Image (tube, grey):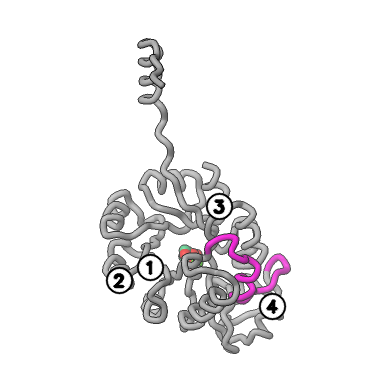
Amino acid sequence: MNIKLPSTLLTALMMSACTQTPKPHELFVIGHRGAMGYETENTLASVEKAVELGVPMIEIDVFKIASGELVVFHDDLVDKLTDGSGPIEELTLEQVKSLNLEGNHQIPTLEEVLDALNKRTDLNIELKGANTADDSVRIVRQYMAEKGYAAQDFVFSSFRWPELYRVRELAPDFDIAVLTGDDPLEAIDTAKELKAVAINPWYKNVTAENVTAIHEAGFKVFAYTVNELEDIALMRSYKVDGIFCNYPDRALTQ
Ligand code: G3P
Ligand code: CA
């Protein structure tokens, strides 16, 4: 069918197409430690809140404790967030479970988070503690074999790059992101060696130029931890691929 529009209408349509505001750059929003702006970080409640807010991925931190389990916790010491004290790595599971976490929560194991999440979002496992690679890979493989998870449902990240080399040795198929608090360009060689998918810099170290350079090197950029609206807008303008956010709804609804 050949529809002829009057020339004045055609001109008006063309002008309006040219003057429309460009769509803002889309960000992949990762719920930081669940949604720690709303619920105690790294708890099942925080994970649930992030799911409720509609994030495509949640980030959690893991430590290996004295009795051998992986638990989901951010700090080296339990002092700040619980009624206990001392290094988390020196506790047994029984001791970890006896701690009262701020807001009357318990510290979960990695398996408890995976069971609760049940594939509703992807999961970024940050290897926060030493010797966490082997057990993280083993547990993820077990959930892939028994609970219907897929390798693409996970990203492994760490500031402890040797842990990432161990992940790559064990699992050529898993996505890896290189965390850095320094100049992100300095992580490019490591990211290449690891066949990583992304470099995750501190947002204060992100510039439009280093995002372009990292993209040209073949990696995505996910900046942490971006909570304020003006910083979220800045990250969009720099064309980062995604952000970690304590209040994921702030970035999802922008
Ligand atoms: O993975 C991004 C971010 O979580 C890294 O910093 O200290 O919050 O674990 P941190
Ligand atoms: Ca983290």
Tell me the residue that label 4 is attached to.
99
Q: For numbered disc 3, what is the local secondary structure?
A: helix
Q: Quadrant of the N terminus?
A: top left
Residue at 59% across, 82% down: 86
Q: Is residue 20 magenta?
A: no
* Apparent side of residue 224 relative to residue 86 in the rendered image (left or right): left
Tell me the residue that label 2 is attached to.
190
Circle on res. 248 = 3
Decide: few, some or many residues near mark 2? Use Cα within 10 Å; few <14, some 14-19, many ≥20.
some
Using the rendered image of the protein, determine whether residue 231 is visible from the camera's viewpoint.
no
Q: Position of residue 136 (x, y in %)?
A: 51, 78
Q: Residue furthest front?
A: 1
Mark in the foreground, 4 or 3: 3
Q: Position of residue 143 (x, y in %)?
A: 56, 75
In space, the residues marked 3 and 2 are separated at their CA atoms by 29 Å
Q: For numbered disc 4, what is the local secondary structure?
A: loop
Q: Position of residue 155 (x, y in %)?
A: 46, 67
Say whether disc 2 or disc 1 marks the residue closer to the N-terminus: 1
Say whether disc 4 or disc 3 marks the residue closer to the N-terminus: 4
Towards the viewer: 125 or 7: 7
Using the rendered image of the protein, determine whether residue 211 is visible from the camera's viewpoint.
yes
Say whether disc 4 or disc 2 marks the residue closer to the N-terminus: 4
Look at the picture and state if 225 lies above or below 107: above
Q: Start and end of the magenta stretch?
A: 102-122
Question: Do tag 2 and tag 1 residues touch (Cβ < 8 Å)?
Answer: yes
In space, the residues marked 4 and 2 are separated at their CA atoms by 38 Å
Say whether disc 4 or disc 1 marks the residue closer to the N-terminus: 4
Say whether disc 1 or disc 3 marks the residue closer to the N-terminus: 1
Mark in the foreground, 4 or 1: 1
Looking at the rendered structure, the kind of residue marked 4 is Leu
Residue at 59% across, 75% down: 110
Question: Do tag 4 and tag 2 residues touch (Cβ < 8 Å)?
Answer: no
